Amino acid sequence: MKKLIIGYILLAGFFACKQENLQKPKATTPQQISHKQTPPQKTTNTTTPTNRPEPTKAQNDPWSWKVWNWQGTPVGKTPAQITAAKGDWKVAEDSDTSDKKRVLAQVANNRSSAFNVAITHPLRALNVEISVVLRAIKGKIDQGGGLIWRAKDAQNYYVARYNPLEDNLRLYTVQQGNRKMLQSADVRIDRKTWHTLSVQMQDQHIQVFLDGKKYLDTVDQTFQNAGLIGLWTKADANTYFRHLQAKPLPSSSLGLHDLSPSQLLAFLKKKDTVILDVRTAAEYTLSHIKGAKNLDVQNAAFHQQLASLDRNKKYIVHCSAGVPNGRGHRAFIALNQLNFSSVFHLKGGIFAWEQGKFPVQRKKN
């Protein structure tokens, strides 16, 4: 009878993990966005992005576009939704356009090694699509600018930038203020007109577009957690920015954060690692990884329990089978939404761990 009960609990746990899925929309490329969203489009050789429609207001849909608009901010002021971490970011009127629409301008003339950073609020995103229309105004040392995302702060982020002085588009990581190039492409376009820069990042896959054409495509795992987005220039690059918008994207997989059982075993040797078993208490009692902490993701107090955890530690979450969008995935997303710095997922769950003949603690008969 005991064997029948144990078998029933394990089977119920497997189906609970498999059936409790998140419903997520499909990702879109910049060429596939619906008419309610504003896709990056190739601009013509004019002084304004006249062929680009005004962005629509974001709906109450978590997957819709978030739009930052400077039209209500007085000229000479920094918008409330912008933190000017470095540089001098002010709203200005674009005198070269007939409607004199307001833009966000970076106007500081800093030294050659300075990175001018404006962080936007309140969106934080792990997987995200971002676009902005920008125009280089002046700069002897540097010109142009770009987008930042997954920003931990003004010293740590990804940045994609276009530089008309160098005729190139580049992708970098910035860690503790130090820049490392990931990829570069030569780009020869009109320096005096507006251009649309856009970025997509899903898990570790990064794609960068300029005027609707993809120039950069790579993978990187430097920043693995949700972060802020923003705008960027370097040194004395004075640049105008319009039509900044961003949209969270669903994960294409859990691959960026997946750990195999053998990788998890290596993690267990580190003192700052915590295993979160998010199955039910009954499942945990039957069999669990030694030292794992049990927090049932289906418990109403789950998010409150997560908030009390030490954010300086690394967390590996798992359920029974580790299926996409199951209980482990739900816990993984919840930790990222609470801005935990290092979160991973055990691929295959405890079933894979036991199949690999790794040690577990079992309920004594």
Image (cartoon, rainbow, N blue to C red):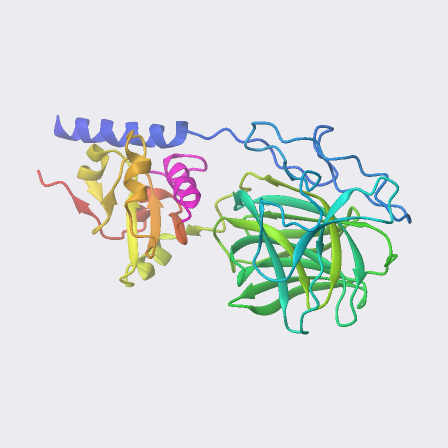
119 vs 332, left or right, is right
Q: Is residue 226 above or below residue 184?
A: above
Q: Which of 266 and 77 is in front in this view?
A: 77
Identify which residue is drawn at 60% across, 27% down: 59
- Quadrant containing the N terminus is top left
Q: What stretch is highlighted in magenta?
A: 320-339
Q: How many marks?
A: 0
Seen as rendered, the residue at the extreme left is 365
- Quadrant containing the C terminus is top left
Residue 343 image point, x, y percent: 40, 50
Residue 245 image point, x, y percent: 66, 41
Residue 115 image point, x, y percent: 63, 66
Seen as rendered, the residue at the extreme right is 45
338 vs 230, left or right, is left
Does residue 76 show up magenta in the picture? no
Q: Is residue 342 above or below residue 284?
A: below
Q: Which of 177 and 69 is in front in this view?
A: 69
Residue 298 image point, x, y percent: 31, 30
Identify which residue is drawn at 19% across, 31% down: 6
Q: In which quarter of the image is residue 186?
A: bottom right
Q: Nearer the viewer, residue 237 or 38?
A: 237
Identify which residue is drawn at 31% across, 58% down: 265
Does residue 334 show up magenta in the picture? yes
Q: In this view, does 352 lie above or below 234?
A: above
288 vs 221, left or right, is left
